[in-house]
Image (cartoon, rainbow, N blue to C red):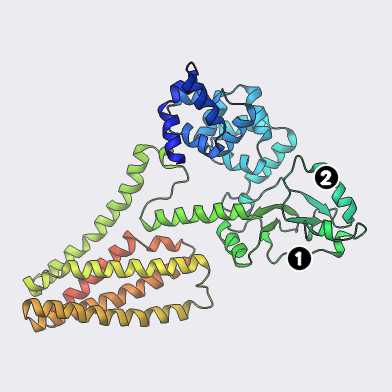
Amino acid sequence: MVEKKIDIFIHNIEDIIEQETKTGTELWEQMLELHPADISDILEQISQDQFNRIFVKFSFEDQLSLFHELSSSYKTLILLLLNHEQQSAILRKYPIDCLVEFFDSISDKDLKRYLEILNKQDRQKAVSLLQFNSESAAGMMNTDIVTLMHDLTVARSVTLLQRIRPSKQLYQQIYVTDRNNVLQGYIQLEDLVLQSPETTLESILQKPYFIASADQDQEEVAHEMVHYSMQSAPVVNKEGLLLGVIYEEDVINVIQSEAEENIHRMSGVVVQKKSYFDISFFTLIYSRGSVLAVLLVVESLTSVIIGKFEGTMTVFLVAFFTTLVSTGGNTSCQTSAITIQGMSSGDITNANMGRFVRREMLIGCAIAALLAAVVFLRAFIVSGNLLGSFIVSLSLGLVVVLSVFLGSCVPILLKKIGLDPAFSAGPFLATLIDIFGIFIYCYIAYLFS
């Protein structure tokens, strides 16, 4: 339903911009009632000229909401569209942690210009956050948070929260520090209602199950928070000073981002931080074509192997090349997907990796026996060639076992050496299986020739 409405807005965008007709005015009023995320979908599908003309028609509050929803390239376009005063108004109202994420995507020249627009306090905070890796806990934390002192009473805390409530969002957990900003623990929001007014916060403090360090990897933080079912996690530096807080919605964004990156890596595509339409045509050709070209060269080893054993490969055996290659590729893809998903969800850990591999090998042997029997019956019934059918079935069984072994071990090995396990899936592992599979098939045919 929403997609149909968006199509209507896009189709009538000129009428909406000009508002010279009744339809245009009505659609403009309807657009203002949409969620900013839906409006941003409309704005990102119209021309730049139309975008420039319609964006200035929104109120400042709507412009700020749209600035948050639009991609980095459109944020840059918006700032170029506005005058210095309007730029200053948007940048100073925008949360610092979100602003730093945007600053990571722009040139040093633009960064310097926009930093000068911020007030001194926000500029210092932004510069401090920019020093952290964007993929670290500090890169995903919220810095505009409410904290309380450990020696405050419940009554005094409520008074303070009532004063700051209009400008800061309150969450279920409120973190407590000492006067040096060293993390002490947290209280639940309901504690301020259930406890007596004279109770001090330090007497009702709870210790978080997990505390993230500023340089800790985002994915690791997300897994820990999911593991402990935490609504939020504090981020501290080496001295224990509270730098910010990571909330559930931040974890969702990280998990979604990691899933998208894994899909790209499993497909043999270079991960791009920008949205698809923000990436240049030639960049896409290079990032995808270069990987495929390398795999093509590596895959040519199969022709070398076949050439070496050409004398032993009969017409009957050649007919089953595609069967062995496709079965091996499917098996390795299936196994690596299970392995990567298990490692991502935390089901497969350092403690149980050996048990996982042993179990997968047993499963692989059982599947290999089943598939070998199926291909033997198929080959023998069709041709009546007993020896040839045996060679095909034995080769396929060994290829399946090898595929399960590589599919389960390669992702684990990559993680051990600090690489993303998702690199092992898709075209990379399939190419490896093709080479080994063809060699196994040809060598067994040679042994029985």
Labels 2 and 1: the sequence-earlier one: 2
Relative depth, front residue between 100 and 312: 100
Coordinates of residue 100 in the picture (x, y in percent): 62, 41
Q: Which mark is residue 404?
A: none
Secondary element under disc 1, as helix, strand or loop, is loop
Determine if residue 416 is in view.
Answer: no
Q: Residue furthest right?
A: 198
Quick one: label 2, few (<14), some, or many (20+) residues within 10 Å? few
Q: Is residue 14 visible?
A: yes
Which quadrant holds residue 8?
top left
Q: Position of residue 348 (x, y in %)?
A: 50, 72
The residue located at (29%, 66%) in the rendering is 432
In the image, taking residue 318 as reference, residue 229 lies left or right, namely: right
Left or right: 161 with respect to 355? right
Q: Is 175 rendered above or below residue 5?
A: below
346 left or right of 206? Answer: left
Q: Quadrant of residue 430?
A: bottom left
Q: Is the Cβ of the residue at disc 2 closer than 8 Å to that at disc 1? A: no
Estimate the spatial distance between the alpha carbons at disc 2 and disc 1, rounded to whole Å.
25 Å
Q: Position of residue 12 (x, y in %)?
A: 42, 25
Viewer-nearest residue: 79 or 195: 195
Residue 162 — which label?
2
**Residue 337 drawn at (x, y percent):** 39, 66
Above-or-below relation of 280 to 154: above
Q: Which is more foreground, mark 2 or mark 1? A: 2
Residue 207, label in figure: 1
* Amino acid of disc 1: Lys
